[in-house]
Amino acid sequence: MNEGRCCHQLEIIHDDILRMGTLVEEAIRDADRALSEQDLELAKSVIEGDKAIDNLERSIESDCIRILALHHPLASDLRTVTTALKVITDLERMADHATAIALIALRIGANPLIKPLVDIPRMSTLARQMVHESLDAFVSRNTELAQKVRSEDDLIDRLYSELHDELLGLIIQGTNTANAEQALNLLFVAQHLERIADHATNIAERVIYLVTGERVSS
C-alpha cells in the first residue's frame, strides 16, 4: 500500500476524531444544562446520544486497525495511529461521564436545587474547552496548546476541591436527608467533570509524547 493512501486514511481518522470530540463536547454541555435547568428530556437525549459516540469509537478503531494491518506504518505514522487509538478511548470515557451526569439530573428530577449551580457550570465550561483544545493540539501537533490544557487541569482541580468541601459540609450536617442526598449527587457530578478534565489532560500529554518523545504526567 502506498504512503499517499495511508496519509489520506489518517486524515479521515483525524476528521472522525474531531467529529467524535464535537459529540462529546455537546454531551458535556447538554448534561450540564439538563442538570442546571432540570430539563429531563434533554438528560434523556444525552443518554440516548451515547450510542452514537460508542459507534463512532468502534468505527475509528476499525480504521486504525486496518491501517496497521494493511499499511504497516513506520515511525511518525505508527505513533499517530497508536495515539489515535488511545485518544478515542479517552473520548469514549468522557462521554460515559457526561451520561452519568445526565442520569443524576434524572435522579434529582424536578426537586428544588439546594443551591444555585455556579461552580458546576464553570467546571463544565472549562472541561469542554479542555476537550476542544486537546483535540486541536492532537491534530495540529501543537505542544504549546497541549501544555495549556495541562495547566487548565489545575484550575479544574481547585474548583473541584472548593466545591467538594462545600458539598461535604452539607452532607455532614445531615439535618435534611433530601438535601444531603442531593448534595451527594452534586458531588458525584463534580467528580465526573473532574474526571473528564483528567481525560482531556491525558490526550494533551499523549500529544506531547507524540511530538517530542517525552513522557509527561500530571
Image (cartoon, helix red, strand yellow):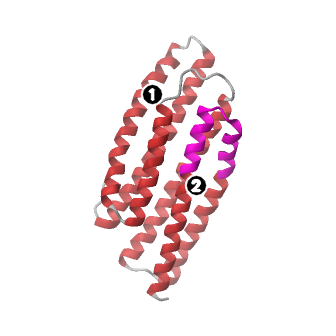
Residue at 62% in and 32% down? 37
Up/down of 96 relative to 39, above or below: below
The residue that label 2 is drawn on is 23
Determine if the magenta segment contains residue 54.
Answer: no
Query: Residues in magenta?
Result: 25-49
Residue at 46% in and 52% down? 131
Residue 11 left/right relative to 143 = right
Does the rendering let one see residue 97? Answer: no
Outermost residue to the top: 175
Q: Could you say where residue 99 lies in the image, as x and y percent from the top left?
A: 61, 44
Q: Could you say where residue 199 lies in the image, as x and y percent from the top left?
A: 45, 50
Up/down of 212 relative to 109, above or below: below
Up/down of 173 relative to 182, above or below: above
Residue 89 left/right relative to 139 = right
Up/down of 24 relative to 77, above or below: above
Q: Could you say where residue 176 lies in the image, as x and y percent from the top left?
A: 60, 13
Please, what is the three-letter code of the amino acid marked with disc 2?
Answer: Leu
Please, what is the three-letter code of the amino acid marked with disc 1?
Answer: His
Characterize the magenta stretch by its predominant secondary structure. helix
Does the rendering let one see residue 162? Answer: yes
Dot label at residue 164: 1
Q: Crowding near pointer 1: few (<14 within 10 Å), some, many (20+)?
A: some
Q: Could you say where residue 17 lies in the image, as x and y percent from the top left?
A: 52, 63
Residue at 55% in and 29% down? 186
The answer for how far apart the CA atoms under marks 1 and 2 are is: 28 Å
Q: Nearer the viewer, mark 1 or mark 2?
A: 2
**Total numbered circles:** 2
